[in-house]
Image: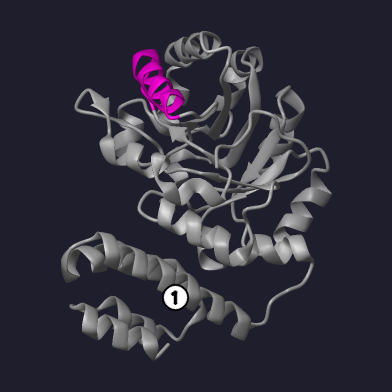
């Protein structure tokens, strides 16, 4: 389901995580947790250029039939205007009219090439991408970014450029790229950012419980929404609990996680060949989903070397 360019009200957004939030996860998460309603938006792991062309497996992800039950915005990562134009044209050709630009990925190889958070260190490239955005008047754009690469004040020099863009929203993770996913959030800078940026702002960072969503809304009542990534993987019911106002007990959480795993596992078992391929796709999920189960049992699942052992280990959870 392609997300519309027009959005209203407070949004719940799922952050893209490479290797985790591809179409099967999005589809079955929306099916099980009721996240397909119009207040939840999913973002694809970034679509990228590889060897001079748009990576085919990224295109397969955003064009899959599995996307039909949830609102999806493709995210792209680019080092400059040429790559960005290629990516937007490819996404548009699939019928999408919304694109999110990744200006926040802290992965060092991407940053060094000026992609992701690395783009923040190249204002001239950022300006070129802004020009490309203007050449697609029938598309809407958003940006997901960090405060900077090394300094939490680097964003200040980009404010004028960002404000000149026609954006549906800006998502800010108030850390620097060098912090990766650890260290304190610069909430003072986030507050300043909200005051300086003219676009709707979405908060991303350490959203782990429904209470976290309530607190950030109380502290920043003008927010467009919140985005959760690792927190949603550790607690897939996060948005469902927040929306309903009812906290789930551990038993309910575990039952739904097992159901989510089963459906993703069955999907990969039907489209991939051999134990190794299936296990390579499904085992990494336990890095997050295993948070609700005994560590010893999860370790047995992750160490499984064949599907028979794997299935047996999961059944013991």
> Residue 140, percent across and down?
59, 23
> Residue 263, percent across and down?
43, 69
Q: Nearer the viewer, residue 183 or 276?
A: 276
Q: Residue at x 55, y 37 (%)?
A: 2
Instruction: Provide the major secondary structure of the magenta segment.
Output: helix
Indicate left or right for 149 with 222 as reference.
Answer: left
Above or below 77: residue 285: below
Quadrant in which residue 277 is drawn: bottom left
Q: State yes or no: residue 83 in magenta.
A: yes
Quadrant in which residue 90 is drawn: top left
Coloration of the structure image: one colour
Indicate left or right for 21 with 164 as reference.
Answer: left
Above or below 222: residue 199: above
Q: Nearer the viewer, residue 82 or 37?
A: 37
> Residue 294, percent across and down?
45, 86
Q: Residue at x 18, y 71 (%)?
A: 275
Instruction: Name the quarter where the N terminus is drawn.
Output: top right
Q: Magenta residues?
A: 78-94
């Amino acid at each position: 389901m392609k997300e519309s360019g027009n959005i209203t009200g407070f949004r719940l957004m799922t952050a893209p995580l490479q290797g985790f939030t591809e179409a099967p996860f999005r589809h079955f998460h929306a099916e099980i947790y009721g996240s397909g309603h119009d207040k939840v938006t999913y973002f694809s792991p970034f679509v990228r250029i590889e060897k001079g062309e748009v990576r085919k497996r990224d295109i397969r992800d955003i064009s899959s039939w599995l996307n039909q039950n949830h609102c999806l915005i493709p995210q792209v990562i680019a080092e400059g205007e040429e790559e960005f134009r290629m990516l937007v044209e490819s996404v548009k050709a699939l019928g999408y009219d919304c694109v999110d630009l990744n200006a926040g990925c802290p992965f060092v190889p991407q940053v060094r090439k000026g992609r992701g958070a690395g783009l923040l260190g190249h204002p001239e490239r950022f300006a070129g991408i802004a020009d490309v955005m203007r050449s697609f008047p029938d598309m809407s754009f958003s940006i997901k970014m960090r405060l900077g690469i090394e300094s939490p004040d680097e964003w200040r020099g980009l404010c004028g450029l960002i404000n000149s863009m026609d954006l549906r929203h800006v998502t800010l993770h108030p850390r620097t790229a060098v912090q990766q996913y650890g260290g304190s959030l610069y909430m003072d800078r986030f507050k300043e950012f909200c005051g300086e940026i003219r676009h709707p702002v979405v908060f991303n960072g350490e959203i782990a419980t429904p209470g976290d969503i309530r607190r950030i809304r109380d502290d920043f009542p003008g927010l467009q929404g919140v985005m959760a990534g690792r927190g949603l993987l550790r607690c897939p019911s996060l948005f469902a609990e927040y929306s309903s106002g009812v906290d789930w007990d551990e038993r309910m959480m575990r039952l739904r996680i097992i159901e989510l795993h089963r459906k993703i596992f069955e999907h990969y078992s039907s489209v991939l060949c051999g134990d190794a391929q299936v296990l390579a796709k499904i085992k990494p999920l336990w890095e997050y989903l295993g948070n609700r189960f005994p560590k010893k049992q999860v370790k047995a699942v992750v160490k499984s070397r064949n599907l028979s052992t794997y299935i047996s280990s999961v059944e013991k959870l």
